[in-house]
């Protein structure tokens, strides 16, 4: 179950990072976050291909890719109440460090589980 959650969070991160890189300047901290999430992605997929059938990993990756793209696009378009945006993409950018930490911790937990077996 952690594999599916971390894969979904991973695709959300990649979509937000892609939008962020188009709109904002890349700093050193953001680059370090991208590297950490990239390494975590390798660990997550190592775990996934080791413990789940390959076709399930690919199917769920595709589904999570579509869901994250639709979700971030909906936030980019905006959620409006009485003509005022309630939740925009700039508020999502504030959650990138939290998302990075959660992805890294989940991937480390799965990798430690992978090594212990």
Image (cartoon, rainbow, N blue to C red):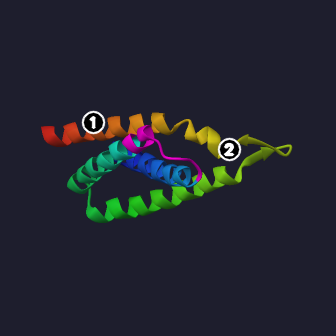
Compare marks 1 and 2 and give the one earlier in the sequence.
2
Q: Is residue 6 left or right of residue 46?
A: right
Q: Residue 103: percent from the left, percent from the top? A: 38, 40
Residue 1 visible in the current orientation: no
Magenta-drawn stretch contains 77: no
Which residue in the structure is indicated by mark 1?
Answer: 109
Q: Is residue 48 left or right of residue 6?
A: left
Q: Residue 94: percent from the left, percent from the top? A: 56, 36
Seen from the viewer's position, the closer of residues 98 and 24 is 24
Magenta-drawn stretch contains 25: yes
Element type at mark 2: loop
Seen from the viewer's position, the closer of residues 25 and 2 is 25
What is the magenta range? 23-32
Dividing the picture into quadrants, the one containing residue 28 is top left
Q: Nearer the viewer, mark 1 or mark 2?
A: 2
Q: Residue 71: percent from the left, percent from the top? A: 59, 53
Which residue is located at x 23 percent, y 41 percent?
111
- Identify the residue at the far right of this view: 82
Question: Which mark, by number, is residue 88?
Answer: 2
Which residue is located at x 37 percent, y 41 percent?
32
Main secondary structure along the magenta-highlighted residues: helix
């Amino acid at each position: 179950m952690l594999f599916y959650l971390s894969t979904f969070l991973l695709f959300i991160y990649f979509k937000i990072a892609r939008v962020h890189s188009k709109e904002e300047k890349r700093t050193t901290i953001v680059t370090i976050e991208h590297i950490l999430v990239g390494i975590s992605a390798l660990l997550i997929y190592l775990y996934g291909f080791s413990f789940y059938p390959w076709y399930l990993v690919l199917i769920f990756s595709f589904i999570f890719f579509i869901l994250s793209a639709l979700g971030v696009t909906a936030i980019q378009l905006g959620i409006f109440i009485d003509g005022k945006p309630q939740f925009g993409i700039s508020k999502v950018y504030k959650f990138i460090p939290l998302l990075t930490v959660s992805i890294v911790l989940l991937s480390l937990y799965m990798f430690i589980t992978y090594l212990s077996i």
